[in-house]
Image (cartoon, grey):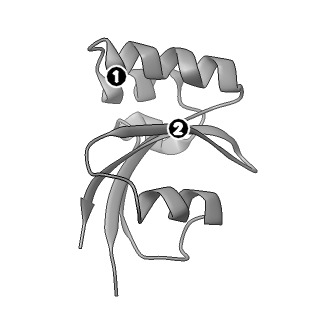
Amino acid sequence: MAQAAARHILVESEDFCNELKSKIESGEDFAKLAQTHSKCPSGRDGGNLGTFGPGQMVQEFDQVVFSAPLNQVQGPVKTQFGYHLLEVTQRD
């Protein structure tokens, strides 16, 4: 079965999500921004979600994680929880 590892930043607004994405693209550290701004408990660990398989996350998340290029920030991705920036760090 396919497996992926990813990290994310969860925020409440699309505008703020885009603002954080711009900061990352300008060289700011993804993990530090996750620690400071993410609404998900994973933010304490730099947004790290560990390894998971298809169907273990919400559908919108899965679609990105199992198709996006590795190590490129994707998003904003809207889910029932808010807006995410996602970075797939590994996929088997």
Q: Residue 90 vs residue 42: left or right? A: left
- Amino acid type at mark 2: Gly
**Residue shown at the point (32%, 30%) measured from the top left:** 31
Helix, strand, or loop for circle 2? Answer: strand
**Residue shown at the point (41%, 62%) measured from the top left:** 67
* Residue at the limit of the structure toward the right, as seen here: 80
Q: Residue 92 vs residue 52: left or right? A: left
**Residue shown at the point (49%, 19%) measured from the top left:** 20
Inspect this view and state whether residue 59 appears. Answer: yes
Q: Quadrant of residue 55?
A: bottom right
For residue 75, which numbered disc appears in the image? 2
Q: Gap between marks 2 and 1, in whole Å?
A: 18 Å
- Amino acid type at mark 1: Lys
Tell me if label 2 and label 1 are in contact, CB under 8 Å.
no
Q: Which residue is nearer to you in this view: 12 or 23?
A: 23
Q: Which residue is nearer to you in this view: 44 or 88?
A: 88
**Residue shown at the point (26%, 14%) measured from the top left:** 27
Quadrant of image for the C terminus: bottom left
Tell me the crowding category of disc 1: few under 14, some 14 to 19, or many 20 or more residues within 10 angstroms, Cα based.
some
Q: Position of residue 8 (x, y in %)?
A: 45, 42
Residue behind mark 1? 32
Q: Position of residue 36 (x, y in %)?
A: 46, 20
Circle nearer the viewer, 2 or 1 = 2
Q: Position of residue 83 (x, y in %)?
A: 64, 37
